[in-house]
Image (cartoon, grey):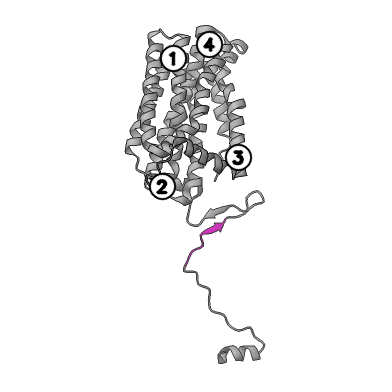
């Protein structure tokens, strides 16, 4: 013990301690209480917008926003076409099932294919094919030769593409941002669906009334082409290396199920998402019948109903 410390102890004083070292900033900090709880934030960060610092993520976000808005337009137009051609709510339900069933069936296979062959590559290939299908729907609608059997077939082809393309694009997000920004990027990416679901139907009502249904579908084809173009531009700083194990697709899917079986939280989230998609989401595609039969309104009324759901989603955007 040093003489200074000993003298302090004899005088009844606490020994002097070295000054704390603040040279290293803490990894996290806590803001002022909000609603009775403290919000955990990364030191030096800005929360949800941290991920927007990455140019690749910015390109992906804007392209997805454009694509979702135009896709919402096409959803309105597809229902409008089906109901305009038949006046039957049953046909509307069949159209919805024709597109949704392939998405559910191919989601797992699409994810495995994207992991094996590259997420960006699969997004480019499938996006190009989906754009061609959408352009076909637009051309036939503008020419006035669309029929229900053709619409069913094209909707089925679109469903096949969405099942693969969506998995590939969503898996790109962790490859574009730093690990610390992944949760912020996912939360911020969710806003594209909320904003796009609101803007798309509003624009669709104007376009259908002024230029016809085919023009609205054509905008979705253009947005798909834009999405594919951005896939060529985007760089993946955190892309995983090639998988050299050469396993089969079924083995990859089995590995996914094994991971799911060992994570109760993931199982619950998947169940919630599946239930929402199966029981809640399809109502949006059945709104043409409500607009025509219940409210006696045309395309502008259908667009208003569809946009209302997107506006409700914008009421609260969750933060990471």
C-alpha separation, residue under disc 1 versus residue under disc 3: 40 Å
Residue under label 1, please give it: 213
Circles 2 and 1 in contact, beta carbons < 8 Å = no
Residue at disc 4, secondary structure: helix
The residue under the point 44% across, 14% down is 213
Neighbourhood count class around disc 4 (C-alpha, 10 Å): few under 14, some 14–19, many 20 upward: many
Where in the figure is residue 93, as x and y percent of width and height?
Answer: 57, 16
Circles 1 and 3 in contact, beta carbons < 8 Å = no
Q: Give the quadrant of the N terminus.
A: bottom right
Range of magenta residues? 24-30
Residue under label 2, please give it: 53
Residue under label 4, please give it: 83
- Can you see residue 195? no
C-alpha separation, residue under disc 4 versus residue under disc 1: 12 Å
C-alpha separation, residue under disc 2 versus residue under disc 1: 38 Å
Q: Is residue 232 left or right of residue 53?
A: left
> Which marked residue is nearer to the observer: mark 2 or mark 3?
3
Q: Nearer the viewer, residue 68 or 314?
A: 68
């Amino acid at each position: 013990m040093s003489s200074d410390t000993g003298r302090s102890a004899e005088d009844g004083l606490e020994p002097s301690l070295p000054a704390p070292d603040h040279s290293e900033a803490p990894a996290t900090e806590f803001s002022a209480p909000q609603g009775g709880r403290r919000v955990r934030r990364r030191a030096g960060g800005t929360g949800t917008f941290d991920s927007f610092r990455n140019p690749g993520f910015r390109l992906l976000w804007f392209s997805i926003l454009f694509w979702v808005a135009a896709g919402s337009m096409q959803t309105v137009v597809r229902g409008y076409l089906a109901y305009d051609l038949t006046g039957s709510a049953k046909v509307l339900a069949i159209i919805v099932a024709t597109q949704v069933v392939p998405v559910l069936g191919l989601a797992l296979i699409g994810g495995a294919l994207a992991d094996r062959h590259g997420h960006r590559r699969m997004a480019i290939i499938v996006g190009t094919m989906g754009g061609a299908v959408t352009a076909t729907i637009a051309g036939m609608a503008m020419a006035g030769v669309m029929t229900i059997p053709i619409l069913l077939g094209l909707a089925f082809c679109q469903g096949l593409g969405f099942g693969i393309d969506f998995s590939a694009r969503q898996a790109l997000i962790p490859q574009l941002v730093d690990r610390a920004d992944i949760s912020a990027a996912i939360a911020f990416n969710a806003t594209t669906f909320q904003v796009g679901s609101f803007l798309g139907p509003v624009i669709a009502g104007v376009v259908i009334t002024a230029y016809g249904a085919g023009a609205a579908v054509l905008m979705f084809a253009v947005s798909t082409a834009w999405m594919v173009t951005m896939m060529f531009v985007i760089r993946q700083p955190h892309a995983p290396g090639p998988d050299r194990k050469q396993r089969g697709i079924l083995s990859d899917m089995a590995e996914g199920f094994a991971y799911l079986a060992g994570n109760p939280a993931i199982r619950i989230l998947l169940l919630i998402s599946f239930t929402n998609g199966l029981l809640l989401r399809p109502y949006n595609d059945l709104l043409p019948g409500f607009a025509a039969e219940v409210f006696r309104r045309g395309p502008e009324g259908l667009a208003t109903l569809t946009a209302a759901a997107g506006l409700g989603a914008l009421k609260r955007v969750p933060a990471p």
